Every structure is written in C-alpha cells, then in structure tokens.
Image (cartoon, rainbow, N blue to C red):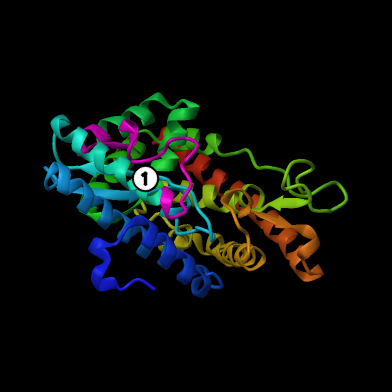
Amino acid sequence: MINKNHLPTATYEDLRAWRNEMIQEKKSDHANLNQFHDELMKEIISLSQNIVESEWGSPPAPFTFILMGSGGRQEQAIWSDQDHGIIFDGNKEHADYFLKLGEEIVKGMEICGYELCEGKVMANNPRWCKSSDVWESQLLGWLEDRGWESLRNVSIFYDSRALVGERSLLTKTKNKGFEKMKENPDILSRLADNVQYIKKGIGLFGQLLPETKGENKGKLDVKEVVLFPYINAIRLLSFLEKIQEAPTLERFDHLSDNYTAIKTYKRPFSDALDLRLKVNQDVKNYESVHFIPLNSLSKKEYEALKSWIKDGSSLMREATNIIKRNSKESEKS
C-alpha cells in the first residue's frame, strides 16, 4: 500500500497498484466504493497538478475540476470511464494551461484504470474546459438551442459535482441555467422529451430480456434498462426544484415534501445499485461492468429486477407528467 506521506512523488503506476490493492476492500459496499473512487481521483489530480506546475508554473486562475456521468452521480461500479471537465475563473488566455492540465489528468486516470470517454466528455476537450463566463454562455446556448444534442449536453453537465477546487464556480454556472429554465418552462418539457426512450427490459410473457448477441449475450443491461429511468426522472425533477446535488440518491433526499410518493422510489434504485455491485464483484473490465448475467441470479433477485424495471417506468411517467403539468400551468400564468 502507498505511503500517503509520499504521494507527491508517487507515479501513476504507483496509484494504479494502490487501486488494485484497495479495491478488494471497497468493492462490496456501494458507498465505500464510490468514496474510494473519489479519493483515488483526487490523488491522480494532485499528481497531475504537480507535473504540470513543474513545467508551466502555478495555475493562472482559480478553477474547479468537475466530475460528470456516473462519477458525478456517485454511481460508479468497480470499473468506470472518464467523464469530467474544468471551470476556471479567468479569461481565454488561460485556456491553454487548463487544457494542458486536463490532458495530464486524462493520461493519469487512464493509467489508473479509468477508460477514456467515447464521447470525449473530458477536461482535455475545449467543450468541457472553459472559463466561467464562457461556460455560462455555452450552457445558455444549449438551453436556447433545445436540439437533441444540446439538451443531452445539458443533462450531462447537470450530473456534475466539484471534486477539487473552487466549488462556487460550478454552483454559479448551474444557477444561470436554472434561471433560464425558470424563465422558459417549455425547456423543461423539451428536456423531458429528450429522455423518454427506455430500453425494453421485460418481454410479453414477463421474462427479462437479455442481450441477444455479442460478448454480453445472456446478460441484462442493468444501466440502460434498470438505472437510467430513475436517473433521468429524478434529474428532471431536480431541474424543477433547482437542486444543485448531482448524485441521484441525494437528489431524492433534496426533493421537497411535495414529492413524498416520488421519494419511495429511492429504495428500489438503491437496491438495484447494490445488486449490480454484488453480482459483478469479479468483473475484469469496464465493458462488462453494467451487465448482469441472468443465469447467476436467484429467483428472488430475478423477480426483484422485474419489479425495479416496472417501478422505473412508473417513476418516469410520474416525473414527466409533473414537468408537463408545470409547463402548461406556467404558460397560463
């Protein structure tokens, strides 16, 4: 195990070895596992900063490094990919420095086992590494455009939390978007339309529908089929409630008392996260971490999955109805 007192001189390979050792202690508990992911990524960022500062000097402006995707929502499994960005409180002249820092962080995270994001949602991409002012303009532009890709980017961004640095930069940017949504309630309706697709998980005869080809044949896509309806539904309500928190479980907790019935869906979502982790204790790569082999399930677990899928669909319908109703009422007033 790495001596934490010597981490500034550690290498990414040292951190990867530390990860491989510690993950065995953390992989049986969802909260502990995600806390460890945070700790590891903070060490990677610290090492990346040291490397960049040795070549480029100290950061030219305050900044925050933000996590998005499953990392932002604290829903990572044993293996995870990279979804992150940087917001800095400076001008365009500082962009090169922070893109360099982003590139170093991407490199370090990849060495430590975090796969590159296929969609390039990473801090070395100028789209996700910007000054605070330009970030706000970009977010407002996405909301104004209201196209599928723009609203997808909005959802990605709001699943963010500040891991290190000036957290107020993220809070300020999110608040700008919340203000825009309040002024234009139809945006929320469009955001709801953007996440209506739910991958079918139950067949005509009440059976679970696994993948039918490829390396995950016979396995259920638990992320798409089970988890995403909850994630998308609660994100929609967090827009309406102006909830800053990104983790889905925390968003449930921060809903107002008007959503007592909605909050009952927190338990099945949490249980689904736990089952994914339990079944995939020994998965060796990111590609398979979100798939559950149906032949490994007990009858009780099989039936629980079916129940969670149905609950997720019900939650999405309820959340969508709330958003649509709010939009209509705002138009009348």
Image-based side of 242 in relation to 210, left or right? left
**Res. 171 visible in picture:** no
In the image, what residue occupies the spot 28% across and 49% down? Answer: 65
How packed mark 1 is, by other alpha carbons closer than 10 Å (few <14, some 14-19, many 20 or more), is: some
- Please say if 16 is above or below 126: below
Depth check: give the residue in front, 330 or 30.
Answer: 30
State the SS at label 1.
Answer: helix
Q: Position of residue 147 (x, y in %)?
A: 46, 25
Residue 261: which quarter of the image? bottom right
Question: Quadrant of the image for the N terminus?
Answer: bottom left
Instruction: Please report the bounds of the magenta region as a residue range.
Output: 110-135
- In percent of the image, x 15 and y 35: which residue is there? 94
Mark yes or no: residue 144 visible: yes
Q: Nearer the viewer, residue 78 or 237?
A: 78
Q: Write down the residue under mark 1.
A: 107
Residue 251 is drawn in which quadrant?
bottom left
Q: Residue furthest right?
A: 205
Q: Is residue 8 magenta?
A: no
Residue 180: percent from left, percent from top: 32, 36
Q: Position of residue 67 (x, y in %)?
A: 37, 50
Q: Nearer the viewer, residue 217 or 333?
A: 217
Q: Position of residue 193 (x, y in %)?
A: 55, 34
Q: Is residue 268 above or below residue 52?
A: below
Residue 128 within the segment the image draws in magenta: yes
Identify which amino acid the numbered label 1 is placed on. Answer: Lys
